[in-house]
Image (spheres, grey):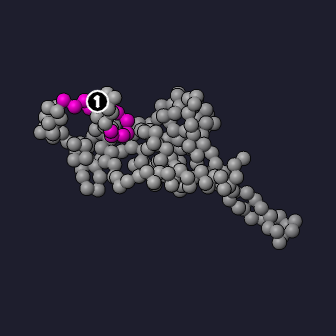
């Protein structure tokens, strides 16, 4: 059993590492950092520190979905966590009954929260589970711009639409972007402007 200090330290270390490596950025597409992490079995949204922990894990791994569950919960859904996959810690509280020291043997007691640590796995880490669909191509908010499309075609750039990250891959000399229908824009740009 992990002690309370180790639990809090694990959470703190993960958040601090993420903050030290982040810069000002507002992603213009729907992905793990823009959706609330949910438990794939119960459907409940994670809260508090767990939201940050799961966002960080999803960002680092490039997960395109934000559904999580424990090893046991995935098993109950008929899914299998792939061998070698690493879980992400989440904290939860179990209420314990504690008798009041002044009450002696009196049955009046009080309930106190006891922090517990569990490890959850993203839907991308399991086999045998079909997640619910998020945004679909029918939700596309990007309006084609003929001049931009012509410029892109003339450049000869290889562009692949996949996942939930945007980057250049030198090994294959290609630009990787999320699918167009995931673009929603930012506070300063429309979905179309953000995509192009």
Where is residue 10 drawn, in percent x and y?
59, 51
Residue 158 is a magenta residue: yes
Crowding near the residue tagged with mark 1, few <14, some 14–19, many ≥20 C-alpha atoms within 10 Å: few
Where is residue 175 drawn, in percent x and y?
28, 34
Residue found at the far right of this picture? 105
Q: Is residue 81 left or right of residue 103?
A: left
Where is residue 95 drawn, in percent x and y?
69, 57
Residue found at the far bottom of this picture? 102
Q: Is residue 70 left or right of residue 193?
A: right
Q: Is residue 79 visible?
A: no
Judge whether 179 appears above or below 105 on screen: above
Residue at 50% across, 47% down: 54
Q: Is residue 61 visible?
A: yes
Numbered label tally: 1
Disc 1 on helix, strand or loop? loop
Judge whether 117 appears above or below 158 on screen: below
Along the line of sight, which residue is nearer the eye, 83 or 189?
83
Where is residue 141 drawn, in percent x and y?
26, 43
Q: Quadrant of residue 88?
A: top right
Judge whether 117 appears above or below 104 on screen: above
* Quarter occupied by the C terminus: top left
Q: Quadrant of residue 176?
A: top left
Along the line of sight, which residue is nearer the eye, 138 or 17?
17
Q: Quadrant of residue 77?
A: top right
Along the line of sight, which residue is nearer the eye, 83 or 21?
21
Residue at 37% across, 35% down: 163
Residue 193 is a magenta residue: no
Q: Which residue does the numbered mark 1 point to in the structure image?
A: 173
Magenta residue span: 156-167
Residue at 39% across, 43% down: 31
Q: Is residue 129 left or right of residue 96?
A: left
């Amino acid at each position: 059993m992990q002690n309370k200090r180790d639990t809090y330290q694990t959470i703190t270390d993960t958040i601090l590492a993420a903050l030290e490596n982040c810069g000002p950025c507002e992603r213009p597409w729907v992905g793990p950092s823009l959706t609330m992490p949910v438990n794939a079995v119960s459907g409940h949204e994670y809260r508090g520190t767990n939201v940050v922990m799961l966002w960080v894990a999803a960002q680092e791994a490039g997960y395109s979905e934000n559904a999580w569950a424990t090893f046991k919960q995935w098993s109950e859904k008929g899914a299998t966590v792939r061998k070698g996959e690493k879980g992400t810690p989440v904290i939860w509280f179990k209420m314990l009954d504690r008798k009041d020291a002044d009450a002696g043997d009196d049955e009046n007691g009080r309930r106190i929260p006891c922090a517990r640590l569990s490890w959850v796995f993203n839907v991308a880490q399991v086999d045998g589970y079909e997640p619910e669909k998020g945004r679909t191509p029918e939700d596309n908010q990007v309006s084609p711009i003929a001049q931009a499309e012509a410029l892109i075609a003339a450049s000869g750039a290889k562009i692949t639409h996949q996942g939930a990250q945007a980057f250049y891959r030198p090994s294959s000399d290609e630009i990787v972007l999320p699918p167009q229908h995931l673009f929603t824009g930012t506070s300063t740009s429309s979905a179309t402007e953000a995509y192009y």
